[in-house]
Amino acid sequence: MTQLSDQYGAINLSQGMPDFDPSPKLIEAAVEAIRRGSNQYSTTWGHEGLREAVAKRVREYNGIEANPEKNITITCGSTEAIAAAVFGLTNPGDRIIVTDPFYENYVPDAILAGCEPIYVPFSRRDQVLDEEALKSAMEKHPKLILLNTPNNPTGKVVGKEELKLIADLCQEKKTIAITDEIYEYIVYDGKKHVSLGSLGGMQEQTVTVGGASKTYSVTGWRVGWAVAEARLTNALRKVHDYFTICAPTPLQEALVTALNFEPSYYDRLREAYDRKRRMMMKILDEAGLQYQRPEGAYYILVNVPDAFKDDEEFSDYLLKKIGVAVLPASALCHDRNLGRKKVRLAYCKKDATLQELRRRFGKFAEKSKSKPAVRSKL
């Protein structure tokens, strides 16, 4: 969709990358690290200063105690952290629970590792995990459960009660949890992010994954981290070493600056994305489109209008006629019916971009008064 967006000159809401720069302090820290010669391999499990900064951050924010030497691995983005954990902690034939819908890399990770995905859907409008489906899946004794909160694409923040259910089932079945918490600071409406690994007994059974991409608006830097007890960390590190050797050295060093930002940075981040969320919802209201109000992250699921057959047809129309690139939600679903009448929009964009989006969706509102004659496919 990003390639098609470039081809058609569309506003690209299909991929979760900001169209604005990170903090100038962070940019300067990266330039300075390059200038002082930090351009070769780092220790494979990460720059010492960054591991120490991550340990401090997860202790203060996530409620997880971690030794920088034994429990923290710096990876090439949170995506690699998850892949390394999946490969390091499973054998071919193991089962992995994946929530449905899901971030698109989880299922390929499972398949490439020779594992069998078991899908547990988010159900109802409030996107609660289907408790009976989860219990049934746990009866199959999965080796892992992959959980993303705040969630891409639903915007769901998994609450403490749901996490407690997952924790109890994991402890009963000896299932290891991999929690993708890349959007941990982007939560709205008084919601609180809770790390599964902070709940009683789960620190020994959880790989907590985070990263710089979303919190510091550096999706292209590819620096993430995995926090886990020593046994899990050792398995993950073996795979990470052969996957990538190490994350980019100067960018690791620069991120020590970011992780030591004042608490006000995270308040401003949350406030800025809440304002963008509200702008996005207002644009959709003006266009007459229905949507699911996100609780966290920076995506919004929009219902496909009745005039369109499915998510692909609607995405095609928005791309070619309105100049807006979105993601057909069925691409993120095992059960295609969960996504075939929805599209995902990312609103991590400058205010000027969102104002232009309002103008273009205004054209959609005018044209939608009559059914558009569009049957082409992406």
Image (cartoon, helix red, strand yellow):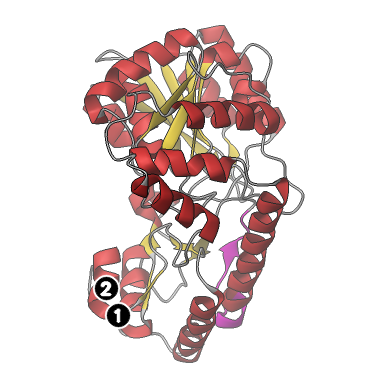
- Does residue 268 belong to the magenta stretch? no
On the rendered structure, is 158 left or right of 342?
right
Q: Which residue is mark 1?
A: 9
The residue under label 1 is which amino acid type?
A: Gly
x 34%, y 34%: residue:
80
Residue 353: percent from left, percent from top: 48, 77
Is 121 or 151 nearer to us in this picture? Answer: 151
Q: Is residue 378 visible?
A: yes
Cα distance in 3D space between marks 2 and 1: 5 Å
Query: Image quadrant for the C terminus?
Result: bottom left
Cβ–Cβ below 8 Å for labels 2 and 1? yes
Residue 210: percent from left, percent from top: 50, 36
On the rendered structure, is 80 left or right of 266?
left
x 35%, y 44%: residue:
104
Residue 176: percent from left, percent from top: 48, 16
Q: Which residue is mark 2?
A: 6
**Magenta span covers which residues?**
285-294
State which quadrant residue 58 falls in: top right
Up the image or down, 256 lies above or below 342; here it is: above
x 43%, y 13%: residue:
232
On the rendered structure, is 297 left or right of 70?
right
Query: Image quadrant for the N terminus?
Result: bottom left
